[in-house]
Image: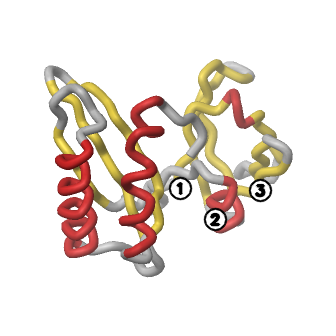
Amino acid sequence: MAKISNTDKKILPILEPIIADKKLELVDLEFVKEGANWYLRVYIDKEGGVDIDDCEGVSRALEAKLDTEDPIEQPYILEVSSPGIDRPLKKDEDFEKYRGETIDIKLYKAMEGQKQFQGKLLGLEDGVISVQDEKSNIITFVQKDVASVRLAVVF
C-alpha cells in the first residue's frame, strides 16, 4: 500500500497476523468518513478469490482484537470484503502480477488535457508505471502523480 496513515500504523500490526494465519492477502485498508460515519474497510483476496466465509473469519478475528486493544478513538463501522473485479493495484507485486492486464489510471493533475487513462500494463520500474494504449503508444506515469490504478472492467 502506498501511503500509510496513522490509523493504518495502529491497525496493520493487529491485522497482518490475522491475514497471514488465514493465508490471505491484504489488498487495501481504508479508514474514511462518509457522512456522519467512519468506516474501517479491509480488502482481502487469495488465489481463486475470497468468499463470504473468508470475509466473516477476518471480520470476527479482527473485531475481537480491535475490541480488546481499542486503537481507534472514534466509533466506526468495520467492513471486510474482496477488492472486486476492479481491484486496486497498490503494491509493487501487484504491478508484476497483473502485467499485461488492462488497467485504468487516474491522475491527480491532468496530463495532456486528461486525468484518466486506460491501457495494457507493461510494468512498474523505479516509480514509473508504463502502459500501452489502444493505438500501441507507450505512456509513462510517475507513480507519485497517480491517484489510483485499478484493473479495468472490460466487457
Q: Earlier in the sequence, mark 1 or mark 2?
A: 2
Q: Which residue is mark 3?
A: 123
Q: Position of residue 86 (x, y in %)?
A: 44, 55
Residue for point 20% across, 54% down: 63
Disc number at residue 151?
1
22 and 140: which is toward the camera: 22
Q: Position of residue 95 (x, y in %)?
A: 68, 57
Q: Earlier in the sequence, mark 2 or mark 3?
A: 2
Residue for point 83% across, 50% down: 125
Q: Which residue is mark 2?
A: 98
The kind of residue on which mark 3 rests is Gly
66 and 106: which is toward the camera: 66
The kind of residue on which mark 1 rests is Leu
Please tell me how crowded label 2 is: few (under 14), some (14-19), or many (20+) other residues with Cα within 10 Å: some
Left/right placement of residue 119 relative to residue 76 reads right
Residue 64, compared with residue 35, is above or below; it is: below
Q: Position of residue 70 (x, y in %)?
A: 23, 39
Left/right placement of residue 139 relative to residue 56 reads right
Whole-angstrom CA distance, mark 2 to mark 3, is 9 Å
The kind of residue on which mark 2 rests is Tyr
Describe the element under mark 3 as helix, strand or loop: strand
Q: Are marks 3 and 1 in contact (CB under 8 Å)?
A: no
